[in-house]
Amino acid sequence: MGRVYNPNRPGNERDRLLKVIIVAINEMQSSCVGGNEFKDLSAFLLLSLKAVCRSIEKTTTAWEKRGYWIKADRFRLEWIWLDHSIANLDRELYKGNWNSIIKVTDEILRYLDAVPLLRNHQFGKPWLGAYKKYKMM
């Protein structure tokens, strides 16, 4: 019997999320985004960053189960900026400081400069309705 392959691994999920995050940030920084869509984009960005954080925890937990503690700790250190960015974005979104959110997204983009930029993506607009979901949390 062959080995079962699961394509929904945390690393694959994280890669997809990072690409969508970059698309969302680029959309936020364009001048044609309206007020409600900007709120949706901001909330979507926050929720996506939290999902990336969960995927990192899944990855490191699996490594620790196998005894790769140093590898897991180094990986967590690579992503330590994520907690700070999530806290800043959550605070500014809660307060409604829309100008400050742009500054936070600039910081996030600096960390994601190695992720390839997708010009012709087919993600659509997955951020629509994200602000309502954020308010319900």
Image: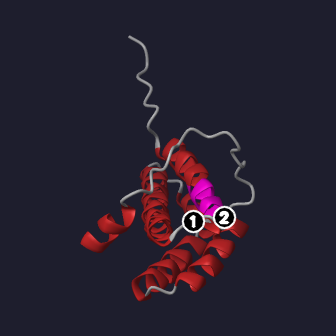
Q: Measured along the vertical axis of the image, is residue 80 above or below residue 53? A: below
Identify the image quadrant of residue 132: bottom left
Q: Indicate the amino acid at tag 2.
A: Ser
The residue positioned farthest toward the top in the image shown: 1
Q: Position of residue 87 (x, y in %)?
A: 48, 81
Picture disc at residue 33: 1
Q: Measured along the vertical axis of the image, is residue 58 above or below residue 94? A: above
Report the side of 77 relative to 124 (left or right).
right
Q: Which residue is mark 2?
A: 30
Residue situated in front as seen by the camera: 11 or 73: 11
Q: Position of residue 52 (x, y in %)?
A: 49, 58
Residue situated in front as seen by the camera: 5 or 73: 5
Pick the quarter of the image with the C terminus: bottom left
Disc 2 packing (10 Å; few <14; some 14–19; many ≥20) = few
The image's colouring method is: secondary structure
Answer whether residue 67 is magenta in the image. Answer: no
Q: Position of residue 128 (x, y in %)?
A: 41, 56
Disc 1 packing (10 Å; few <14; some 14–19; many ≥20) = few
Specify start and end residues of the magenta stretch as a single range. 21-27
Q: Position of residue 49 (x, y in %)?
A: 49, 64
Q: Residue at x 59, y 84 (%)?
A: 99
Identify the image quadrant of residue 90: bottom left
